[in-house]
């Protein structure tokens, strides 16, 4: 059914685009393009405006009609009973639960990037100011590795990178 829809869309784009171009050419040139179109120019209607409308409609359809799909990425590995696949979004959500263990973290965003035989984890945090920021980041890295290894059975980690994008003061003026 998907292939049928794609073919119908392509046919519609080709037909409306061709008709629009023929109408525009027929109104601009002195050739008998209009005779081919079945006497559209008989009367007061000039074929330029319907032609431009069809060309614009075709361009608009092409630009908006085809949806971009986000490709869901999976981390797959073989187990005794078969293949197990976990989406990288699900892994990132699972890692995000670690944020609750760190009261000094204001906000944490996680990105999981699958590689050939392992994964990279990128963590972006907003954190409260304090003397132990470096230690908190190291503990966070270690904790993420533990959660992935013990909770999901993922031991193939290349690196866990923590990026601090904001250090917020303890006492914010509200």
Image (tube, rainbow, N blue to C red):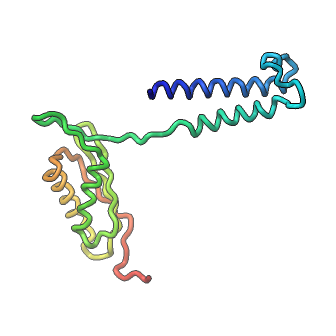
| Frontmost residue, 160 versus 104 | 104
Classify 21 as above or below 104. above
Q: Is residue 135 visible?
A: no
Q: Is residue 172 left or right of residue 134?
A: right
**Looking at the picture, how far across and down is residue 116, in whole percent?**
26, 36
**Looking at the picture, how far across and down is residue 115, in whole percent?**
28, 40
**Looking at the picture, how far across and down is residue 173, in whole percent?**
43, 83
Q: Is residue 83 left or right of residue 33?
A: left
Residue at x-position 57% and y-position 26%: 10
User: Farthest residue toward the right?
Assistant: 44
Classify 14 as above or below 68. above
Q: Is residue 173 visible?
A: yes
| Frontmost residue, 173 versus 54 | 54
Residue at x-position 69% and y-position 23%: 18
| Quadrant housing residue 78 | top left
Residue at x-position 35% and y-position 41%: 72
Residue at x-position 52% and y-position 24%: 7
Q: Can you say which quadrant of the picture contains the N terminus?
A: top left
**Looking at the picture, how far across and down is residue 151, in whole percent?**
15, 53
| Frontmost residue, 53 versus 139 | 53
Classify 136 as above or below 153. below
Q: Can you say which quadrant of the picture contains the C terminus?
A: bottom left
| Frontmost residue, 16 versus 102 | 16
Classify 10 as above or below 145. above
Q: Is residue 12 left or right of residue 146?
A: right
Q: Is residue 147 left or right of residue 108?
A: left
């Amino acid at each position: 059914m998907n292939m049928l829809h794609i073919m119908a869309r392509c046919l519609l784009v080709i037909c409306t685009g061709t008709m629009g171009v023929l109408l525009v050419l027929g109104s601009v040139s002195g050739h008998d393009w209009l005779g081919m179109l079945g006497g559209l120019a008989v009367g007061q209607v000039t074929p330029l405006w319907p032609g431009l409308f069809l060309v614009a409609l075709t361009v608009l359809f092409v630009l908006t009609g085809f949806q971009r799909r986000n490709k869901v990425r999976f981390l797959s590995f073989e187990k005794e009973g078969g293949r197990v696949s976990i989406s990288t979004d699900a892994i990132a959500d699972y890692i995000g639960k670690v944020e609750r263990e760190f009261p000094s973290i204001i906000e944490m965003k996680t990105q999981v990037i699958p590689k050939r035989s392992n994964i990279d984890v990128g963590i972006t945090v907003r954190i409260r100011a304090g003397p132990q920021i470096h230690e908190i980041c190291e503990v966070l890295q270690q904790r993420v590795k533990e959660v992935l290894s013990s909770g999901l059975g993922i031991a193939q980690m290349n690196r866990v990178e923590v990026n601090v994008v904001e250090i917020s003061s303890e006492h914010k003026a509200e």
